[in-house]
Every structure is written in C-alpha cells, then in structure tokens.
Image: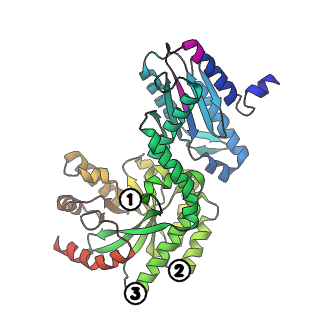
Amino acid sequence: MRRLFTHDSLTGLPRGRWFIKKLQGNLKRSQGNISFAVFYIDVDNFQIINDIYGYIFGDRVLKQVAQRLEKYITSKDGIVSRIGSDEFLIFYPMIRDREKIYELANGILAEFNRPIICDNNKLYIGLSMGIAFYPDHGREAHELLRNANIAMYNVKDEGKNSFAIYDKSMCKEVIDAAIIKRDLKKAVKHSQFKLHYHPQIDLKSKEVACLEVLTRWEHPEKGLIYPNNFIPIAEENGLIVPLGDFILYSACKQLKEWQNNGFTGYGISINISPIQLQHRNFIDKVRDILDETGIDPCYLEFEITENSLIRYIDQTNDILAELRNMGIRISLDDFGTGYSSLSYLKDLPVDIIKIDRTFIKSIENGVERAITNAIIDLGHEMDLCITAEGVETKDQLNILRDQGCDRVQGFLFSKPLNNIEIENKVTEIYQQINAI
C-alpha cells in the first residue's frame, strides 16, 4: 500500500510527490556545496498516439519510455519519476563536470532515435528536455522544477526533440508562448488567420506553376504572428486539425475565385501536418472541400516536411497514396535536412521534392553545388519534379537552371503576398522571368 502511494502503478517509477521530497532532502544535505541537475522531460505529441491507437496502447508505449529513461540513470542516487501522463523528471546527483550532463542528454535523445516497437507498430518518439542546475538555477525545489520546465518549453518552441539548459532569457519566451497557447483556440474559432501566397516559377515554361499557401495569424494585441510561433502549439493541443481545415477551405475557395476571374494555369501548394494526415476524417474532409469549392484535385499539392514524413511513415504512407490516387500531388519539403535516405525516398509516395534553402544559400560553393546537382539528377531519374526554395540572386538562379532544376521559389521573384497583391504581381513576375 505504501508503494502504491509513492510509486506510479503503470511504470513503477516514483510519483512526483515522492520525487520532490527526495529532491528537498538532497537540497538540505548539499547546502550549496554540491552541484546536481534536474531534468524536466515531455514526450512530444503523445496525445496524438492516444488519439490514433487508444489509451491502452499509449500506456504500453509509456512503459517502454520509462524503461529507456531508467537505463540511462546509472548513479545509485539518481531518480527517474513520472509526474503526468507523458511527463517525467530526472534527478542526477554530484556533478563535477557539466559535460557529463550534456552527454547524458544526448544519449537519451539517441536512445529514442531507435523506434519503439509496440503491438507490431513501429513508432519514433521525440523528447523535449529542459535542464536546471543546482545551485546556479535555483536553491529550492520549486525553483529548479519551474526553471527546468521553462527550458523544456523553450525546446518545444524551437522545434522539439532536443534539450536545453535553463537561461534567464527564456522566461519572456515562455510567457509569450503561454499567451499564444491561451489565445490560439479563440483565434481558430474566430478565423483570425490570413493567407499569403508565394509563387513557384517553372523554369522551362517561364510561368507561375504554383502558389505556396502561407498562414499568418493577425493577433489583436501582438500583431502579425508567423507560423513557426503557433503551428507547433496547434499541433500539440490538437487545434492543427480545425486550423488546417480552415486553411485548405480558404485556399481552395480563393483559387476557384481566381479561376472564375480568368487567373488560370497554376495551382496551390498547402503545408500539411502529419497530425492532420493521421486524423481519421482527413480524406473525407479533403473530398468535401474539393466538392464544395469545385476545385479539380490536379490543381492541389500537399507539402509535408521530410523529417515529419519519415517519422510517421508507417501511419501516413497509405493516406498519401490515397491522396495521390485522387489526383493531388505530394511534395517532400525541406529535402536534405533530415534523414535523406535513398532507401526511404524510393518507397515514399511523393511527386515533388523541394531542396532546402540551406543548400541554395551557399550553392556557389563547390560542395553545395555538387549536392544540389546530385539531388536534381536523382529526382529526375525517379521522375520527380524538383523545386529549389530560397532563391534570392541571379547567380543562384543561373546555377539551378544549368543543373536542370524544374522550379524555383524565392525573394528574387517575389515575397509572399496576400490575395490582392498576388493578382497585381503575376504580370510583373512574368515580365521579370522573361528578362532574366
């Protein structure tokens, strides 16, 4: 009975109250003379696993997460605790060298690069970890836990699946993130989002081939908020599904209006979260929106990032294949920044790969030029269309054109524009293309 009170019945790990009691005991004994670390760990997007597979399956995954975390705490005085559905704490004692903690954090992340196998399903689990050191980041238990938690949320804001050491500068960022999280539900309900469009240029036809749809949140107090500041939060709390529905419907409705007014010949490309793809009604929702707006699927492209697609490949492959059968093209975004495995690429149901802007930025360098050339040649061997994003200079454009790149996108031609600006800009873009 005593153990049931102090330890979690699912994982067998100490509960949060027991962890805090032990932490307070260590604080009293150390009296500022011995350094130690507190980790605050959250399993990224765990609610999605529960939504897709159910809570019993999710519990089995959590047991494996707990076992892997315990594996890395070799000190007899170290503690791993479960404090929430998908949150864990680690106490690591007597630190003489902080490099030991960095190695420990990197080792944990590397451990979760291996998939978790559960009921014949292969899952990749990401962890966001915040770390606070005693006495530098607090001399009381609540201070250390709060600051480790702040560092963990900083990791989530920066893209998840990593670790961060607490720093005072993080406090404002966490407060801003909390405000965004608080207001996001209201923003979705009241459609406070505006769409912008970024042209993709076909280098052979010298025409606008597609408009990538980019979302901006017009916050009533904070002004314009860009997607990297709210999309991760929307994915975390499930609002990405209604937000994604709004973006898809609004973009298709706008495209139909353009077509009715004589602006034809190009389609739209929409960024899709893997969480949207896995939602049980996603395919039906896409069909309903296409039927309601009257858009032919051939004018639609869905973009999904390389890392997201590979991480959720088992869950999304069939869905992407069904979308392609409908006539929608699939684009692999940020290619070259993630796994970039040829064995994955040949099996992915994609039509387009987008070369990440990090390679285009330095394409005049021999190494980057060789990389882009290899990607373009490989893509063409596989009958894929190649788009280069982040093109800002004529020299970059000329190199890509010589290499046989199909499409380019970047500030050389245009910044992202709203629906009124894009109508006025199309003619100017055509003139600019023909002049280059």
Residue 159 shows in this picture: no
Mark 2 or mark 1, earlier in chain: 2
Measure how far apart labels 2 and 3 are at the Cα level. Answer: 15 Å
Residue type at tag 2: Thr
Q: Position of residue 349 (x, y in %)?
A: 48, 60
Rendered residue at 45%/83% (across/down):
257
Name the image quarter holding the N terminus: top right
Residue to which mark 3 is pinned: 261
Part of the protein shown in magenta: 27-39
Residue kind at label 3, given as amino acid type = Asn
Q: Which residue is mark 1?
A: 353
Element type at mark 1? strand
View extreme (bottom): residue? 261
Q: Are marks 3 and 1 in contact (CB under 8 Å)?
A: no
Front residue of 125/9: it is: 9
Ranked by sequence position, the earlier of labels 2 and 3 is: 3
Check residue 15 for magenta coloring.
Answer: no
Q: Is residue 36 above or below residue 246?
A: above
In the image, farthest residue toward the front: 221
Q: How many marks?
A: 3
Residue at x 16% of width, y 73% of height = 435
Name the residue nearer the viewer: 424 or 310: 424
x and y, in percent, of residue 120 in the image: 65, 44
Q: Quadrant of the C terminus?
A: bottom left
Give SS at disc 3: loop
Q: Quadrant of residue 413?
A: bottom left
